[in-house]
Image (spheres, coloured by chain):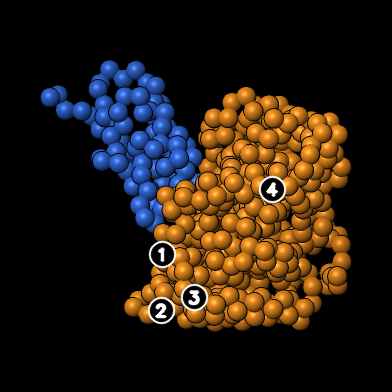
Chain colours: A blue, B orange
């Protein structure tokens, strides 16, 4: 389990990821993280844009993960490039 | 009514979910089995039946479509006679790969965005039912939250969605009662109930063929599967599914939720003071009082964690028991109105996730919101009568209204 409140010295980029093989369309993520996850015409979850979790959206991401009955949602952390 | 089996002697070796004591004491029975080290109960009734009760085992059966078939989903003495892959009520009674095709036809009309359009209608329906209760004298008036409220909500909504006459709601409820509650009856009597339901549906379907309109029945008559319209058996079976799955289930969830609020004033207060807590409360109602236990048939002889399962035996899938497994849920036996981590399985797990879950959630949320808005304080006043069989919820729920708005 990721600690979303960690004070990492390194700037990191958080992204939500939906495993479409596991998603069965419970729609819990869509209800809890509407800024991060949308649903298609079949009611299956799709991440909005590339799934990047913007500052302030960490709680939505955490709730989406913690409420998926099929364990289909994960948070992946990419190290941001030094642009 | 004529019951084939007598009272249960032992829940571990003689389990019968259609014994009236089962639903009335379900939480205790599951706790006792779990704590007694019995993760899979058994019974010789119904031609053999197993019942895993832990989350891990329920999950395993739900995901295993090789060893378990969905051809039968309501435990009874008989076995389904409609041949695979369609089954008697597609797609819930279908197995892969046909299942996915049949399911995808029905997903769009039940997607969250399509279902959201029903919100205003449902809210109006709830208020009509509350109005019909007549003059309410706080502290004096007793209403039945199951009979005068919960039981009429989902049946009216699904009748409208199918384009069936809403005034037939008693007929629908009677059909569903005979199919899901009277499982303990002789086979001939059950076949008679199914025959009458088929005859009723034939009339409705014929009427839709003659007068097509914008509803689910017309949708099922026109939709194509691999370039062909659906077989009439498939159309009728899907309507049976929507009627059976859409009525008792949500009615039970609404009733159980109101029963909880009638007996836990602090949670009622919290919902009244902070309506936004509903985002989490809704799911906790579904977790703690999940109404639906599914079933499978064993597809082939195999050993399941030491249980010698034989083809054609039943396996109950008590998702409500899985939802109370302390191995998965912290304080599983406590109702926590704002529980933030809640991976409950009220709508099943795996490929047969309840097709109507978005509709059920909408109905449940609005039904509670409107009841609580009208009656911000109420308490249980009398005996609750619980349903019998795989769908668990109060069938009579007398509450005394303590405050009105």
- Which dot, 4 or 2, sits closer to the camera? 4
Report the chain holding disc 3: B
Q: Chain of mark 2?
A: B
Q: Is residue B373 above or below residue B117?
A: above
Of pointers 1 and 2, the one earlier in the residue sequence: 1
Marks 1/3: CA–CA distance = 26 Å
> Which residue corresponds to mark 1?
B104
Q: Is residue B14 above or below residue B403?
A: below
- The image's mark for residue B129 is 4
> On the image, numbered disc 3 is attached to which residue?
B211
Q: Secondary structure at mark 4?
A: helix
**Residue shown at the point (59%, 62%) measured from the top left:** B159
Are discs 1 and 4 located on one and the same chain? yes
Q: Quadrant location of residue B401?
A: top right
Q: Nearer the viewer, mark 3 or mark 2?
A: 3
Q: CA distance from mark 1 to mark 2?
A: 14 Å
x and y, in percent, of residue B55 in the image: 59, 49
Q: Which quadrant, please, contains the N terminus of chain B?
A: bottom right
Give coordinates of residue A50: x percent, y percent.
25, 40
On what subunit does the disc labeled 1 rest? B
Disc 3 from disc 2: Cα separation: 18 Å
Chain ID, mark 4: B
Dot 3 or dot 2: first in sequence order is 3
Q: Nearer the viewer, mark 1 or mark 2?
A: 2
Quarter in which the C terminus of chain B is drawn? top right
Report which quarter residue B228 is drawn in.
bottom left
For the residue pair B141 and B290, the one nearer the viewer reads as: B141
Say which of B220 and B325 sits in front.
B220
Residue to which mark 2 is pinned: B229
In the picture provided, is B181 more to the left or to the right than B244? right
Identify the mark nearer the N-term, 3 or 4: 4
**B93 left or right, relative to A58:** right
């Amino acid at each position: 389990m990721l600690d979303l409140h960690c004070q990492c010295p390194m700037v990191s980029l958080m992204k939500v990821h939906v495993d479409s093989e596991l998603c069965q369309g419970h729609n819990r993520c869509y209800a809890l993280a509407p800024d991060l996850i949308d649903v298609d015409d079949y009611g299956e979850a799709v991440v909005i844009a590339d799934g990047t979790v913007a500052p302030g959206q960490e709680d939505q991401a955490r709730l989406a993960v913690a409420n998926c009955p099929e364990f289909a949602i994960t948070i992946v952390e990419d190290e941001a490039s030094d642009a | 009514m004529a019951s084939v089996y007598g009272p249960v002697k032992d829940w571990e070796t003689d389990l019968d979910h259609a014994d009236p004591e089962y639903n009335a004491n379900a939480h205790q029975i599951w706790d006792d089995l779990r704590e007694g080290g019995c993760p899979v109960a058994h019974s010789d009734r119904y031609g053999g039946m197993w019942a895993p009760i832990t989350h891990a085992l329920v999950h395993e059966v739900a995901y295993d479509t090789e060893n378990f078939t969905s051809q039968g989903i309501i435990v009874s003495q008989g076995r389904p006679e409609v041949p695979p892959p369609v089954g008697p009520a597609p797609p819930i009674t279908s197995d892969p790969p046909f299942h996915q095709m049949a399911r995808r036809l029905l997903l769009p009309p039940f997607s969250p965005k399509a279902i959201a359009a029903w919100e205003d209608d449902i809210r109006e329906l709830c208020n009509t039912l509350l109005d019909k209760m007549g003059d309410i004298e706080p502290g004096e008036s007793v209403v039945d939250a199951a009979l005068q409220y919960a039981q009429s909500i989902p049946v009216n909504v699904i009748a409208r969605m199918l384009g069936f006459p809403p005034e037939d709601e008693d007929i629908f409820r009677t059909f569903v009662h005979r199919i899901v509650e009277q499982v303990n009856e002789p086979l001939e009597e059950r076949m008679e109930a199914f025959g009458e339901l088929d005859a009723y549906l034939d009339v409705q379907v014929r009427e839709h063929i003659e007068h097509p309109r914008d509803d689910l029945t017309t949708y099922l008559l026109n939709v194509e599967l691999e370039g062909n319209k659906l077989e009439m058996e498939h159309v009728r079976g899907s309507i049976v599914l929507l009627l059976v799955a859409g009525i008792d289930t949500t009615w039970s969830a609404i009733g159980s939720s109101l029963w909880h609020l009638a007996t836990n004033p602090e949670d009622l207060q919290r919902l009244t003071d902070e309506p936004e807590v509903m985002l989490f409360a809704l799911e906790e109602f579904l977790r703690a009082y999940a109404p639906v236990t599914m079933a499978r048939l064993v597809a082939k002889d195999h050993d399941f964690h030491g249980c010698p399962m034989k083809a054609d035996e039943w396996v109950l899938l008590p998702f409500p028991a899985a939802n109370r497994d302390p191995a998965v849920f912290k304080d599983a036996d406590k109702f926590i109105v704002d529980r933030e981590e809640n991976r409950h399985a009220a709508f099943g797990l795996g490929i047969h996730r309840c097709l109507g879950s978005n509709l059920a959630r909408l109905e449940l949320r609005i039904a509670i919101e409107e009841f609580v808005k009208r009656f911000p304080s109420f308490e249980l006043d009398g005996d609750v009568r619980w349903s019998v069989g795989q769908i668990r919820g109060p069938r009579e729920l007398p509450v005394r209204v303590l405050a009105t708005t």
